[in-house]
Image (spheres, rainbow, N blue to C red):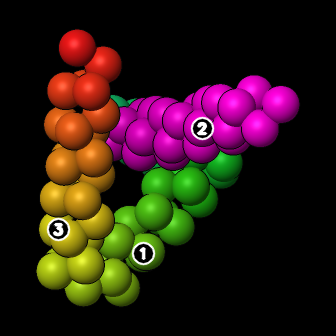
Amino acid sequence: MIEKITKFGWLAIELAFMLVVLCVLLSLVLGKESGAFISSVAANTLDLLQKVPSGTVLGVFLILALYWTFRSRQAR
């Protein structure tokens, strides 16, 4: 039961992340023509990334990369 909830939770997180990335990319491609929702998501994302120190972003990225590497090695 907990495994199903965990898988569902990770799926929801991945979908939300993909939605944010898609909105940022659409905002870059379409510019001002992208619409209110896409523009607001892109603006909020850029605002968050500008407020977070670069060392924190790098640290989170490295931790996720290490986790992914160890996880893929365990699957073999």
CA separation, marks 2 and 1?
25 Å
Q: Does residue 35 appear left or right of residue 51 in this picture?
A: right
User: 23 or 59: which is nearer to us?
Assistant: 59
Query: Which of the two discs, 3 and 1, sits closer to the camera?
Result: 3
Query: Which of the two discs, 2 and 1, sits closer to the camera?
Result: 2
- For the residue labelled by badge 1, is the local secondary structure a helix, a strand or a loop? helix
Query: Which of the two discs, 2 and 3, sits closer to the camera?
Result: 2
Circle 1 crowding by C-alpha within 10 Å: few under 14, some 14–19, many from 20: few
Q: Amino acid at mark 3?
A: Leu
**Image disc number at residue 58:** 3
**Is any part of residue 6 visible from this angle?**
yes
Q: Position of residue 30 (x, y in %)?
A: 40, 34
First of labels 2, 3 by sequence position: 2
Q: Is residue 49 above or below residue 66?
A: below
**Image disc number at residue 47:** 1
- Residue drawn at (60%, 38%), measured in percent from left and top? 10
For the C terminus, give its image quadrant: top left
Q: Amino acid at mark 1?
A: Asp
Q: Does 17 appear in magenta?
A: yes
Q: Position of residue 9 (x, y in %)?
A: 69, 40
Q: Does residue 64 appear left or right of residue 42 in this picture?
A: left
- Residue drawn at (33%, 42%), measured in percent from left and top? 28
Magenta residues, dominant SS class:
helix
Which segment did they paint magenta?
A: 1-28
**Image disc number at residue 10:** 2
First of labels 3, 1 by sequence position: 1
First of labels 2, 1 by sequence position: 2
Q: Amino acid at mark 2?
A: Trp
- For the residue labelled by badge 3, is the local secondary structure a helix, a strand or a loop? helix
